[in-house]
Image (cartoon, rainbow, N blue to C red):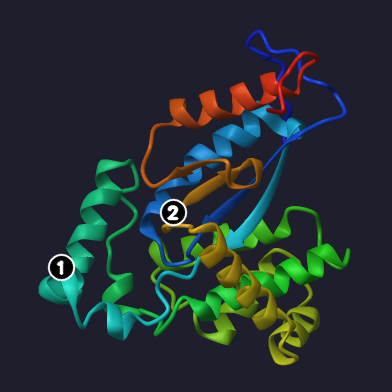
Amino acid sequence: MVESTDTSGTTEAPSKKVSFSYWSDPLCIWAFLAQDKLDRVVTEFGERLAIETRIVPVFGSLALRFSKGPWAKAGVAGRVEETRRIAAELGHPEVDGECWRVSMPASSWAPGVAVKAAAVLERAGSAEVGSTAEYLRMLRHAFFADNRNIAQRRVLLEVAEDLRIARDGLEAGLDDGSALAALWEDHDARERLKIQGSPTYLFDGGRARLYGNFSYGILRATIEELLRGLAPGGSDC
């Protein structure tokens, strides 16, 4: 993580950070494409941020998603084409959309629970700081760019091992229910906080949020204002 030296006129209290939660679904193409914005934020503001990775499993059942509404009308072929189109428009020509045809999981809860297993390990100090966010990023890349079914335990464990997340620890969390409990807690919080979908940035306990496909400038300006609020004279009203 790189700390930016460009304060843009802000003088934040050095001991304080802007904390926010980042909510996304492992199978969300918009979250895959929005990763560049999150990376830029981390590069620019570095250690002044504390980011919590949360799962908002909007694709609980892909069979249901394809049974009604616009996804049903377009079908799998339509989803392949739409994914390819928006990925190419936003600078990711490596995404061909075939993930929906050749490796579609039945549910995003499967990779979601694996991410929460990694989070349990990270909280316990058994995985490196930041490994949960990186694991989610790599799983999403495995699905959209490599066309791998990230609901399969074999794939989940292979990606984890690439990050040196302990296989036995991850499997223990998957098997004893602790990861599923953590995912349910995210789902419960999503209902309580009225998270609309993926991706969503939630600031200040929910008093501010950014949802969907917005520009990097909006995200940067939001964080700058929150950092400014940490300076002496900032208001908590």
Tell me which corner region of the image, top left, top right, bottom left or bottom right, holds residue 63: bottom left
Point out residue 13 in the picture as x, y percentages from the top left corner.
82, 21
User: Dividing the image into 4 quarters, which one contains the C terminus?
Assistant: top right
Q: In this view, does 7 lie to the left or right of 189?
A: right
Point out residue 106 in the picture as x, y percentages from the top left corner.
39, 85
Q: Residue furthest left?
A: 73
The residue depicted at 16 percent of the width and 68 percent of the height is 70
Instruction: Name above or below for residue 212 compared with residue 23.
Output: above
Q: Is mark 2 on a helix, strand or loop?
A: helix
Instruction: Name above or below for residue 101 compared with residue 221.
Output: below
Q: Is residue 154 left or right of residue 34?
A: right
Q: How far apart are marks 1 and 2 (CA)?
A: 19 Å
Tally the marks. Answer: 2
Q: In terms of depth relative to the viewer, which is nearer, 144 or 121?
A: 121
Q: In terms of depth relative to the viewer, which is nearer, 165 or 197?
A: 197
Mark 1 Cα shell of 10 Å, populated few (<14), some (14-19), many (≥20): some
Q: Which amino acid does label 1 sit on?
A: Gly
Tell me which corner region of the image, top left, top right, bottom left or bottom right, holds residue 222: top right
Point out residue 66 in the picture as x, y percentages from the top left corner.
23, 79
Q: Mark 2 points at which residue?
A: 32
Q: Is mark 1 on a helix, strand or loop?
A: helix
Q: Name the residue under label 1.
A: 78
Q: Residue furthest top?
A: 9
Tell me which corner region of the image, top left, top right, bottom left or bottom right, holds residue 171: bottom right
Residue 107 badge:
none
Q: Is residue 99 left or right of residue 193?
A: left
Q: Which amino acid does label 2 sit on?
A: Phe
User: Dividing the image into 4 quarters, which one contains the N terminus?
Assistant: top right
Instruction: Name above or below for residue 83 compared with residue 165.
Output: above
Q: Residue furthest bottom?
A: 175
